[in-house]
Amino acid sequence: MSEVIVVGVDDSPRSERALRWAASEAASSGRRLRLIHAFEWPVVYPSMVNAVPVMEPVDMEKAAQALLDRLADQARAWAPGVSVETEAVAGAATQVLCRASEQASLLVVGSHGRGAVARVLLGSVSTALTARAACPVVVVRTSDSGAEQRDRVVVGVDGSAPSLAALGFAAEYAARHGFSLAAVRCWDPVREGNEEPRQQLTDAVASQRSLYPELQVTELVLEGRPADVLVEQSAGAQLLVVGTRGHGTVSGLLLGSVSQGALHHAYCPVAVVHPTPPS
């Protein structure tokens, strides 16, 4: 596993909240923290010459580094002892952070709040990264509040490879932080017939109980649409963890309805975990 947590930063409030979350996680896990700010060179058309002042490339680089230096100081204040690195990269944020995720154990980004317009407000960068990044992605929104008082992690489990990867991520995170774990199996009796969801969930969780014997685990089998059930369970949670299918080149194409619903409407930060590819 890489020992680096990458966080995408800019000068917005949502970026600051993501940075604070990432700094705390780096301190807890003993990993380095890398702040990446992606910026794009301005496009100047002939009609703009001598009409609109345009920042020179050298000035853009200086401004980007000044922003990173300020945010790095904040991160060190929030998480003393954590090794903090900075990198200003010219390019589109999605492409820059996707490349960075290939060398990271975790990618953290900020986004807008939840609600009826969350699908629009979530942001193309956050949506694309959760579908395409090479490592787990945590999306932290500006509306997430009271996380310091929350003491449980919620994970959706259905027995699939993505959900088992999510379960492993959630169990490790919960055990390390001393949180409890709520493993949720959503069940539709009309669609799934006489399946035994309780036993399926117990079987899936058994390995994590063995790995983390001190971890307090609650198994919940709840009827309803998985996205709706998980969003409801996210209220009062520290983190909601969901699995999703493999990587795609079109944002959202392979993300899946459950992951999409969680990202758009959850009450807490959301971790999206891809299944580990075979070695």
Image (cartoon, helix red, strand yellow):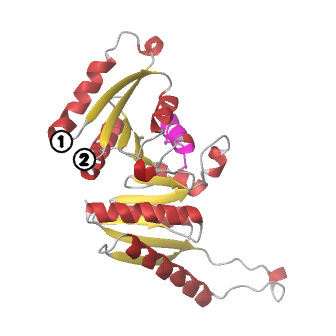
The quarter of the rendered structure image containing the N terminus is bottom left
Q: Is residue 68 left or right of residue 6?
A: right
Residue 78 lies in quadrant: bottom left
For the question of whether residue 81 can be seen, the reply is yes
N-terminal label among 2 and 1:
2
Q: Which residue appears at 38% of the width and 75% of the height?
A: 76
2 and 1 marks in contact (CB < 8 Å): yes
- Considering every residue shown, the one lying at the far front of the view is 149
Is residue 255 within the magenta segment?
A: yes
Q: Which residue appears at 38% of the width and 77% of the height?
A: 85
Percent position of residue 245, x then y = 42, 40
Residue 95 vertical position relative to residue 193 in the rendered view, above or below: below
Q: What is the secondary structure assignment of the residue under circle 2?
A: helix
Percent position of residue 191, x then y = 46, 15
Residue segment shown in magenta: 250-264
Which residue is labeled 1 in the image? Answer: 214
Is residue 64 within the magenta segment?
A: no
